[in-house]
Image (spheres, rainbow, N blue to C red):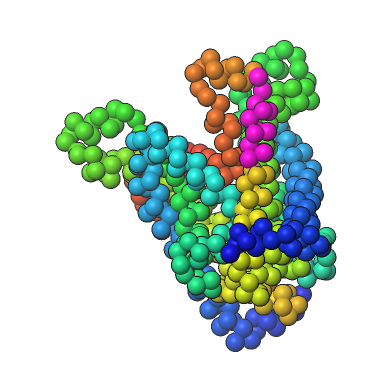
Amino acid sequence: MTLSWLFDPAHWSGVDGIPVRLLQHLRYTLVAALAATLVAVPLGLFVGHTGRGGLVVVGGSNAMRALPTLGLVTFLFLVLGSGEVSALVALTVLAVPPVLAGTYAGIQDTDRGVVDAARGMGMTGWQRLWRVEVPNALPLLLGGVRNAVLQIVATTAVAAYVGLGGLGRFLLDGLRAFDYPKMVAGAVLVAALAMVLDLLLALLQRLVVPKGLRLAAGRRGRVPARAVERGGTDVAAAAATREGTSG
Amino acid sequence: MLDDLSRYLGSESNRELVLTQLVQHVPLALLPLVVGVVLAIPLGWLAQRHPLVRTALLGSANVVYTVPSLAFFVVIPGIIGTQILDPVNVVAALSIYTAALLVRPVVDALDAVPAHVVAAATAMGYRPLRRFLAVELPLAVPVLVAGVRVASVSNISLASVGALLGVGGLGALFTSGFQTSYLPPILVGIVLTLVLALVMDLVLVGLRWLLTPWARAGGTR
């Protein structure tokens, strides 16, 4: 049933067609991910590099994970008014914590010995940040972006409830009209989009592991897989564990 | 805004409604934690022993994790044959998320049990199952609790998405507030979600304290 809905040519054209909805969903995702990155990466770099405010950032972004997506979307809709802007703000707000946590963890994760060596070579603070810490942080940073993108794709579907376009429309419209093939087709499309984007970012994440790190990992007989793991979740768990074992 | 809020909470019937939704929300979010832990421990045990199972399980856990919650909620009935509006769908989906999130930490924690500890337990006559339950699993508790804390926060927040399918819980405050363009129930819902997440986190930290008596004895580590 769902398959025949998906492959019905009538559903592939017009303003309510799959390509239009897919592109809308993609556009919201890209805009919100970009906005969140622009906010979170500089902040994460600052906190990670200077070590100032680390507790506030980790605690704050953990607390923000608890924000209910539907609550935030409906809240901003009523406060900022209807339209795409309020939904995009909600998407961005929810995407900031994972990127922030990933960036901060990436910088913190940089081998202190390497940073000290860079300082010994006479590198300034900026040079250490850009040439040592950022390259080291990239895999975890991108892990954070990966989590953020998953969060945005999922929340965009939820935001269809307040009238946002995107693939969530099929899902919620289908649900409202008891058109189950349409609803499940919407769910399948959203899930497929999330998986494809996650896969692309996972590939990118592998590509950005600095050559030097890869060599070092090879010499130590350790696969750099650890650095390529999904950033945010692992980071949160790791942070919690660290706090647990020391306390 | 505050006036509206106090007027909203001033009404007996509203307070009762909020309480009802809160009471419905707790099992939606917390039952999956229990189910997820119960699933993840044997799965992690299997995965730690068989490389093939490990690859398959960790791979599928990653895939499960990418599925957006709303999509998962509506696909579940097709898989387990429930009605679309059944709260069981939300519980099932969140349980699977929890298990997917916990499998990797469980495997990592079991990997991290020192070989000499296992050898000592074996030498003392522990059979594999008892050794697992009495030695390896307790040592994995801190990592397991860390994972459950992450899952707890995300479940408490995700359970409200169920309101879009007509499942009760704090999410119902969001949909009713949206439909009537009335902010107070939405605010109350958000605050209660955050408070519930915080309380659960404290409970879990307390649980870890109870389950790891060796970590607080002496404090020589």
Give the camera-side residue of A98 and B218.
A98
Q: Is residue B119 above or below residue B133?
A: above
In this picture, residue A164 sits left or right of residue B142: right
In this picture, residue B33 sits left or right of residue A104: left
Estimate the x, y position of residue B25 in percent, counting from the top left. 52, 70
Q: Residue at x 19, y 39 (%)?
A: B127
Going by the picture, which residue comes out furthest to the bottom? B12
Estimate the x, y position of residue B119 in percent, counting from the top left. 25, 29
Name the image quarter holding residue A101: top right
Give the camera-side residue of A34 and B85.
B85
Residue A140 in magenta stretch = no
Residue A200 in magenta stretch = yes
Name the image quarter holding residue B109: top left
Q: Residue at x 53, y 14 (%)?
A: A219
Estimate the x, y position of residue B165 in percent, counting from the top left. 59, 71
Give the camera-side residue of B2 and B182.
B182
Q: Is residue B106 above or below residue B111?
A: below
Q: Which residues are magenta?
A: A199-211
